[in-house]
Image (spheres, helix red, strand yellow):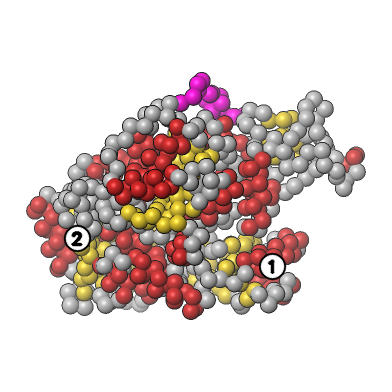
Amino acid sequence: MPLARLFDYAAPDDCELAPGDRVAVPFGARQEIGVVIEANAASELSAERIKRVAALRDDAPRLPGDWLELMRFLSGYYQRPLGETIIASLPPRLRSMRPLPKKALAQVDGPASARFSPSHVPTVHQSRATQAIATSLGGFRAWLLHGVTGSGKTEVYLHLIARVLESGGQALVLVPEIGLTPQLESRFREAFPEARIAMLHSALEDVARTSAWLAAARGDAGIVLGTRLAVLAPLPKLALIVVDEEHDSSFKQQEGLRYSARDVAVYRAKARGCPVVLGTATPSLETWHNWRQRRYERLELAERAAPGAKLPAVRTVDLRADPAEDGFAKATLTAIAERLARGEQSLVFINRRGYAPVLSCEACGWAAGCGRCTAHLVLHARDRRLRCHHCGAEEAVPRACPTCGNVDLKPMGRGTQRVEESLALRYPDARIVRIDRDSARRRGALSRTLEGIRRGEGDILVGTQLLAKGHDFPGLTLVAVLNADTALLSTDYRAPERLFAVLAQVAGRAGRRATPGEVLVQTRYPGHPLFAALARHDFAGFADSQLEERRAAGFPPFVFEASLRAEAKKLGQAMAFLRHAAASVPAPDEVRVYDPVPHVITRLAGHERAQLVMQSASRPALQDHLARLCSDLFANATREVRWHLDVDPIEFD
């Protein structure tokens, strides 16, 4: 493993070192890559105990001072060791002893052209938004670009980036999903045919990712486009940050350094002195609250950009009056048949992949469960496998019930595969395209499928959240939402916010041209206020009501939260660890520490999990307590229990 702590070394005789240099150092019986944090500093160790740096690695640019300051902020705010934060923020190849690939080191001579070739004439609203944000170039300002689905937020980004490139600056554009990067990359390359664009996301091969990071770090790439990890790249000419679909939970890293790329983007823009644009149709409640508190400025794109395009009509289908058969109410099936007859596309949205969420025995009540998690195995019918969507474990479908021997095992519930099967039986001549993480596993498969859909190669689309964000399908006029009620019954206080966002986003795929769109939401709770707000396209009313509920209940953004989580072979060990941690570092009066509780999914990948939640109305008070708590935990580490701290958590399962 790379160095994750701070150590003292003597500089080599043949060169001087400075903060930000990558160096090879002896570490035990091997050599590792480290980063110089301080140079010419005094050491508490005696000279004979200090080893010497083996070599300076000068094949990449020195990590700049503002980047090191960003790492210090991340280390302090998210309570992780500075060395671990720095190493984890570098691409794998730059923290490896292997030499950098020659292709990655190749540089293109001469500056890239900033020629801008817009494909559309901006609307009045787009032009106003662009001009307003452009006035802040050269200084920090946080903008909420609140545009309905199809309003052309990307067009605003393009015109802002054109101004940045003209002045020789860099623009960082963050998207929540890897699947959105090819679509935006295509738009950017069409608009800026001669610009250098660096793509940064985890699916890239080693050479491509290293090349893109180096192009960003050298300032050669005028546009840096990527997922959350791109916010950690050095950008010497940074002049604009865009966070597209800023509400999306994918911007929160859930392993290792648990940072929010959206929040880091705002901090980085402020430290750099450049504007940051948070674009979305459904702002996160934190962002909406920041606008209400006048920390952010809001620009609204209230109309769709395409001529004649209107927001779709949204209505509920009452499953109490129109019971579902094979997952579909009669009204939904009729609407799909009408689109097929007219040659229009329909999207059936169900946020559950696989064939069925549970395989069960009706004779004795047995249900297939994961041996490593407190979760059911999901049936995947095509390859006759049961898979855990939490830890990845899988096994063959049993021939008979392991408890009573009954051979008539039944699937319960529906996933995308089963919905696809039902539609194929009902509409045998329709071209049905299923898009979920199973169908999009092969490299490039998702991009090819989406492009085919845009060309009209598909009559009925069946998909999960992969289809809900940012995609433009000209022929799509109907969206049918199945299984929306589960989120209404969740104990997670963020569940209504997430449900409204995903429904509004997937609804926004319909009617993006002159042909009107329609959205049908199957539900047993048609009178729920959330569905009423969705039908009115009233995000503001919904968000304000949710904030009032959060205020009354004492939830974020009116308090600040952190969660200390522990994993052990036995639940008792994890619970005892958390109780001891809370008792060892007493919290001040401003910080409330709740009793430790098991996770909803208590066992995950063979480990039992529990958590302890801390809240405070004062961010500094909470941060001070977390710093003292982590110092104690690092000093008294135990091998029996693994722990991590999640600051500003968004998941509690």
Q: Decide: marks 2, 1 in contact (CB < 8 A)? A: no
Q: Secondary structure at mark 2?
A: strand
Between residues 491 and 128, which one lies in front from this camera angle?
A: 128
Q: Residue at x 23, y 51 (%)?
A: 512
Spatial separation of the CA atoms under disc 2 and disc 1 = 51 Å
Q: Position of residue 584 (x, y in %)?
A: 74, 72
Q: Amino acid at mark 1?
A: His
Q: Is residue 90 above or below residue 532?
A: above
Q: Residue at x 63, y 76 (%)?
A: 592
Question: What percent of the width, then of the height, locates residue 302?
Answer: 30, 57
Say whether disc 2 or disc 1 marks the residue closer to the N-terminus.
2
Secondary structure mainly formed by the magenta segment? loop
Amino acid identity at mark 2: Glu
The label shown at residue 518 is 2
Q: Magenta includes 37? A: no
Q: Which residues are magenta?
A: 98-112
Give the residue displayed 26% in from the left and 63% down from the top. 481
| Residue that carries the numbered disc 1 in the rendered image | 625
Q: Secondary structure at mark 1?
A: helix
Q: Is residue 324 left or right of residue 590?
A: left
